[in-house]
Amino acid sequence: MNRLMHFMMIATCTIIISCSSSADTQSQLKKIDELQNKGFPITSEQQENIDRHVAEGKSLIQEGKEKEASEALAKAIDILNRALDADIYNKAD
């Protein structure tokens, strides 16, 4: 039951963060780096999607489209958070 509550809490936080359109893109990029440095396993498909969303976000930042960039980066963070959640869940077994 504790694992389920922990998973639900993390999922809720992820949704709230992902929906925040006013999030600072630089802090999102920092969050992506922090998550990637944790070294939890991710699939090659997840990594490709993360790379694609980060590249899109950086391109949109250069174009001055902060809201769109934030949305793209939030997608990368969501993928990383899901992979981290899966790793935590699998280790709890």
Image (tube, rainbow, N blue to C red):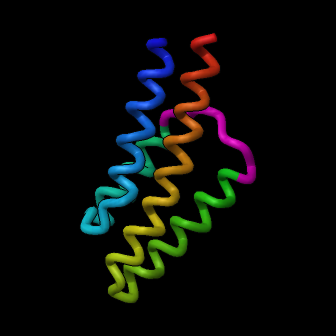
Residue 64 lies, with reference to residue 10, above or below; the image says below
- Quadrant where the image shows the C terminus: top right
Main SS, magenta region, reads loop
What number of labels is visible?
A: 0
- Left or right of 82 on screen, residue 90: right
**Residue 83: percent from left, percent from top:** 59, 38
Q: Residue at horizontal 44%, vertical 49%?
A: 33
Q: Residue at x 26, y 64 (%)?
A: 24
Q: Position of residue 44 (x, y in %)?
A: 74, 49
Q: Residue furthest right?
A: 44
Residue extent of the magenta highlight: 38-45
Residue drawn 40% across the image and 49% down it? 15
Q: Check the image and name the residue furthest to the front.
A: 1
Horizontally, residue 29 falls left or right of residue 52, namely: left
Q: Is residue 85 above or below residue 75?
A: above
- Asked if residue 66 is positioned above or below residue 18 in the image, the reply reads below
- Is residue 76 shown left or right of residue 61? right
Q: Is residue 19 magenta?
A: no
Q: Nearer the viewer, residue 70 or 51?
A: 70
Residue 40 horizontal/vertical position (percent): 58, 32
User: What residue do we see at 49% from left, 42% from top?
Assistant: 81
74 left or right of 21 in image? right
List x then y, in percent, for residue 58: 45, 74
Q: Nearer the viewer, residue 15 or 65?
A: 15
Q: Where is residue 42, by image quadrant?
A: top right
Instruction: Assess whether residue 42 is covered by the magenta stretch.
Output: yes
Can you tell which quarter of the image residue 55 is in? bottom right
